[in-house]
Amino acid sequence: MKYKKILIVSFIMFFSIFILNFAKESKEISPLNNFSKFPLKIGKWQGKNDFFDQKVYDILGVDDSVLAHYKDAENRYVQLYVGFYRSQKEGDLIHSPKNCMPGSGWNIVNSGLEEINLKNNKKIKVIRLNLKKDSEEQIVLYWFQSRGRIISSEYWQKIWLVIDSITKGRTDGSFVRIISPVNETREKTLETLKEFTIDIYPYLNEYIPS
């Protein structure tokens, strides 16, 4: 196990060097639409915009983003965050919740992959985190939507970043995160998150370039 961790860390460091070198030459790609126009009415969901503190945006290094809270008629709550990067340069790489959430006091008690069947018969895999802080619980679904791909792995996110920087001259990308508190059961919360993902996915493609 010790050697496996050393290999993983070495792997990440190796690809990070490649990323920083090739990202300097990558072209900047703008979103298809400004995320300030992201819809707040999506099917049965009604949303309200919100914002992080400026220091959070400074840390994220994001070029465009949306943070919104959505509810439906059953009072089910979902928070959506999408961060878009025109070019991932030094200091402006996409951050993983596996690093950020524990820093906010949330403990990762379980993680895995979830398959979601979209309306167009397409299937995507996303990352799931079960989090806990004191008596509070929440579930997170997230993925990297970059250059026409849905990526459900931090490692493959870095690998594709290097490949696309070389073959396409592009390092633009986005991070999509959806959070919902566990008010009843984990199963129902996960079902809510999947429903919301199915509903918003077509809209994401109107903002994130392929």
Image (spheres, rainbow, N blue to C red):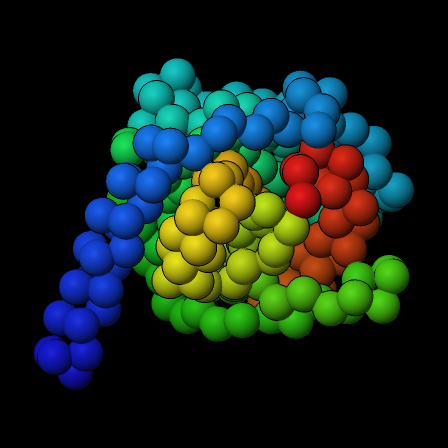
Q: Quadrant of the N terminus?
A: bottom left
Q: Is residue 174 above or below residue 91?
A: below
Furthest residue in direction top, as rendered: 54
Q: Is residue 141 visible?
A: no
Looking at the picture, tell me which residue is in the foreground, 14 or 70.
14
Query: Could you tell me which residue is drawn at 83 percent across and 32 percent down?
Result: 41
Query: Could you tell me which residue is drawn at 74 percent across and 42 percent down?
Result: 205
Q: Quadrant of the C terminus?
A: top right
Please identify the quarter of the rendering in which residue 23 is found: top left
Please identify the quarter of the rendering in which residue 93 is found: top left
Query: Could you tell me which residue is drawn at 34 percent across and 21 percent down?
Result: 58
Where is residue 121 shown, x and y percent of the image? Answer: 85, 68
Where is residue 101 shown, x and y percent of the image? Answer: 36, 48
Q: Is residue 142 above or below residue 11?
A: above
Q: Is residue 122 visible?
A: yes
Q: Is residue 84 above or below residue 193?
A: above
Where is residue 165 shown, x and y percent of the image? Answer: 44, 45
Query: Could you tell me which residue is drawn at 52 percent across and 62 percent down?
Result: 152
Looking at the picture, tell me which residue is in the foreground, 88 or 135.
88
As drawn, is 27 to the left or to the right of 109? right
Disc count in the image?
A: 0
As drawn, is 207 to the left or to the right of 6? right
Q: Is residue 186 above or below residue 74?
A: below
As drawn, is 121 to the left or to the right of 90? right
Looking at the picture, tell me which residue is in the foreground, 5 or 105.
5
Where is residue 56 shown, x and y percent of the image? Answer: 37, 26
